[in-house]
């Protein structure tokens, strides 16, 4: 590894113009009403590979742990054996379907209630993306710019030439040609333009690098916001992002399915616990450690000011520590088990090295999966040789953003200026230091049947006397209303289909905006109810009723008078159709994956969506 930070002598302004043009596609969304909050389950698009038993199983468990709405699933076919792909295939087969599902304008859809901030890949998607063609375009652009400069400023006749400062013969060789799936998803706008994302300051949400980042405030995140070059919200030119992570890598040097489910359960349980462990910054003489050490003292000071224990220690790992609430390491190889240290629930642990995110079986250096195996909520690593460029790795301030109440994903992306090669794996929603409210909702009770107007009056109690800024109504996964404190959330159920629905009321705290420290607090309450206005009925049963073996089948029987057909869906995936208003279908359990699964049976009306009818969900557990 070579330390090359001093050679970043641009940004090239013409490339920024590319970004400004592309940003124009989405600037109109900046006016959309959207909360600056630390993200809830309704803000997640969960991307699942239906060809992979691991991907289905992990997604099933995560959806239950995090209460991901059924409408927020995207099923994308991918060959599980294909661990890497090229960037054009990634754009066509993965990124554009993701953007369509997230309802971005690039897909031709402009939905005022668009709310997806997180794109979360389950497992068995390509963790590495080859970007040779994009890299060539970027290098060609730099060469044209350099040629233009020389033509604009010819050397004066007779003037003595000064000896130029020593530089590498080709600085662009440090833009190595492999990227991560989550890095390119996060940088979706410049990725569609084809090149800008390799720039060392491509992430304007992060604003600055270490150690300068210690001066920056902590920001909540919104995908509808155009971030300016210094993190300003709603500026032009500006860039939009989508927080993105993988829940797991189960191929190659990844984790087992059981390990993944274990660390996801631990991280979900850590939310709002305000843990008392210690965050360790481990330093040594290795270049992997030295490039970040200048930022350690400021980060420790800020953590202690928040009441979070933090310590700078010498070595490769914390040794014999039973309170590891986070760790920032700098080492190519390590053995966590031999350290006899314990990682506590909710901890972010990562190491600065060349191939920590290269998940091929025979790759060199310790992979990020080692930290997840022993209980970390999230870990990261580079998918190829990045060189010792600090902009490509999290700064020490990542742990400070986390301790100020951000989610894992917000904390990572605020701390990495150039994230295109960083593979981030774990639970993006984990937030141990969040101020999660207790929410009370008057006007509706769980299981109630509603006729006509629904009027709910929410209240929330946050710790420390923080007040709610506003409340949101989310119906079947889609945000449909907002109201101020002491207001009400109103819904005319005459305008929705009869049958089972899910109401979520989210409370968002008063507090930080761009330029103000901390992450806005958020929480939600889920209330199932039924609507009955159009005299539509449906009855559905499942055999077996609760638990099915993976090698067996489910028999769904449904009857819905006057329906033109009946559909059985799982998330957003159609499983089977019944012709007419009465019938039975068989569904193989292995197509659903192991773990908790929610099936929805829908009677299709003949007068549009409002004439449909929804049966109560069928909750099934698929076992080995």
Image (cartoon, rainbow, N blue to C red):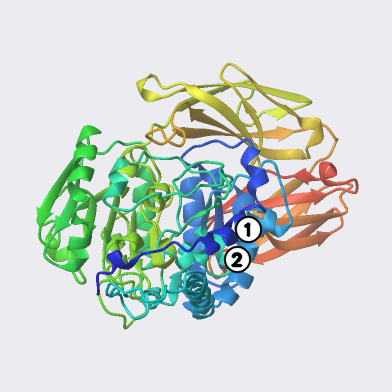
Q: Are marks 1 and 2 in contact (CB under 8 Å)?
A: yes
Question: Is 115 situated left or right of 371 in this image?
Answer: right
Residue 303, image x, y percentages: 23, 39
| Vertical placement of residue 446 versus 103, above or below | above
Which residue is under mark 2? 192
Q: Is residue 467 above or below residue 247?
A: above
Q: Nearer the viewer, mark 1 or mark 2?
A: 1
Q: Residue at x 60, y 44 (%)?
A: 115
Asked which quadrant contains residue 616, the reply is top right
Residue toward you, 417 or 162: 162
Query: x, y (%) of residue 371?
Result: 27, 61
Identified at 70% across, 39% down, the residue is: 500
- In the image: residue 457, left or right of residue 12: right
Image position, residue 350 (x, y; %): 28, 59
In this view of the protein, can residue 543 be seen by the observer? no
Q: Which mark is residue 235?
A: none
Which label's residue is closer to the chain start, 1 or 2? 1
Task: Check the image and report above or below for 57 versus 539.
Answer: below
SS class of the residue under badge 2? helix
Disc 1 marks which residue?
22
Closer to the camera in the image, 501 or 6: 6
């Amino acid at each position: 590894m070579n330390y090359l930070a001093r050679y970043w002598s641009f940004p090239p302004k013409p490339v920024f113009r590319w970004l400004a043009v592309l940003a124009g596609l989405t600037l109109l969304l900046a006016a959309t009403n959207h909360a600056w909050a630390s993200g809830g389950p309704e803000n997640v698009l969960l991307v699942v590979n239906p060809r992979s038993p691991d991907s289905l199983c992990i997604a099933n468990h995560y959806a239950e742990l995090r209460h991901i709405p059924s409408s927020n699933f995207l099923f994308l076919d991918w060959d599980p054996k294909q661990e890497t792909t090229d960037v054009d295939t990634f754009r066509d087969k993965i990124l554009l379907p993701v953007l369509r599902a997230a309802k971005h304008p690039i897909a031709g859809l402009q939905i005022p209630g668009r709310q997806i901030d997180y794109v979360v890949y389950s497992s068995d998607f390509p963790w590495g993306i080859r970007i040779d063609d994009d890299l060539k375009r970027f290098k060609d652009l730099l060469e044209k710019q350099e040629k233009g400069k020389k033509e604009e400023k010819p050397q004066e006749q007779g003037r003595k030439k000064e000896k130029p400062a020593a530089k590498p013969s080709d600085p662009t060789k440090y833009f190595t040609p492999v990227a991560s799936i989550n890095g390119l998803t996060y940088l979706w706008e410049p990725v569609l333009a084809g090149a800008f994302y390799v720039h060392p300051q491509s992430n304007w949400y992060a604003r600055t690098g270490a150690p300068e980042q210690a001066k920056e405030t902590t920001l909540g995140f919104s995908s509808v916001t155009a971030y300016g070059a210094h993190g300003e919200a709603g500026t032009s030119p500006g860039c939009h992002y989508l927080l993105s992570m993988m829940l797991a890598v189960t191929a190659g040097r990844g984790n087992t399915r059981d390990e993944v489910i274990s660390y996801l359960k631990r991280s979900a349980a850590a939310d709002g616990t305000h843990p008392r462990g210690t965050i360790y910054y481990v330093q040594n003489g290795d270049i992997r450690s030295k490039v970040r050490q200048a930022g350690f003292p400021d980060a420790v000071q800020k953590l202690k000011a928040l009441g979070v224990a933090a310590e700078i220690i010498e070595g490769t790992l914390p040794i014999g520590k039973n309170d590891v609430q986070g760790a920032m390491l700098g080492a190519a190889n390590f053995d966590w088990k031999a350290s006899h240290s314990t990682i506590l629930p909710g901890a972010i642990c990562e190491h600065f090295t060349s191939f920590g995110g290269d998940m091929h079986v025979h790759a060199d250096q310790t992979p990020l999966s080692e930290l997840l195996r022993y209980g970390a909520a999230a870990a990261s690593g580079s998918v190829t040789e990045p060189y010792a460029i600090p902009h490509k790795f999290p700064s020490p301030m990542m742990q400070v953003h986390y301790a100020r109440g951000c989610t894992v994903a917000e904390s990572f992306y605020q701390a990495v200026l150039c994230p295109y090669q960083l593979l981030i794996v774990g639970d993006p929603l984990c937030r141990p230091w969040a101020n999660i409210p207790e929410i009370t909702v008057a006007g509706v009770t769980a299981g109630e049947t509603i006729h006509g107007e629904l009027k709910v009056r929410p209240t929330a109690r946050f710790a420390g006397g923080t007040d709610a800024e506003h409340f949101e109504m989310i119906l079947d996964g889609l945000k449909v209303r907002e109201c101020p404190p002491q207001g009400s959330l109103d819904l005319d159920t005459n305008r929705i289909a009869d049958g089972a629905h899910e109401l979520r009321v989210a409370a968002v705290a008063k507090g930080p905006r761009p330029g103000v420290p901390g992450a806005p607090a958020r929480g939600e309450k889920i209330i199932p109810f039924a609507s009955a206005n159009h005299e539509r009925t449906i009855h559905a049963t499942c055999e077996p009723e609760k638990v099915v073996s993976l090698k067996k089948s489910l028999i769904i029987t449904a009857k819905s008078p006057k329906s033109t057909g009946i559909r059985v869906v799982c998330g957003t995936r159609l499983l089977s159709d019944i012709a007419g208003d009465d019938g039975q279908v068989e569904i193989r359990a292995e197509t659903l994956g192991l773990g908790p699964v929610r099936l929805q049976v829908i009677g299709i009306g003949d007068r549009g969506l409002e004439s449909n009818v929804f049966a109560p969900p069928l909750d099934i557990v698929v076992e080995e």
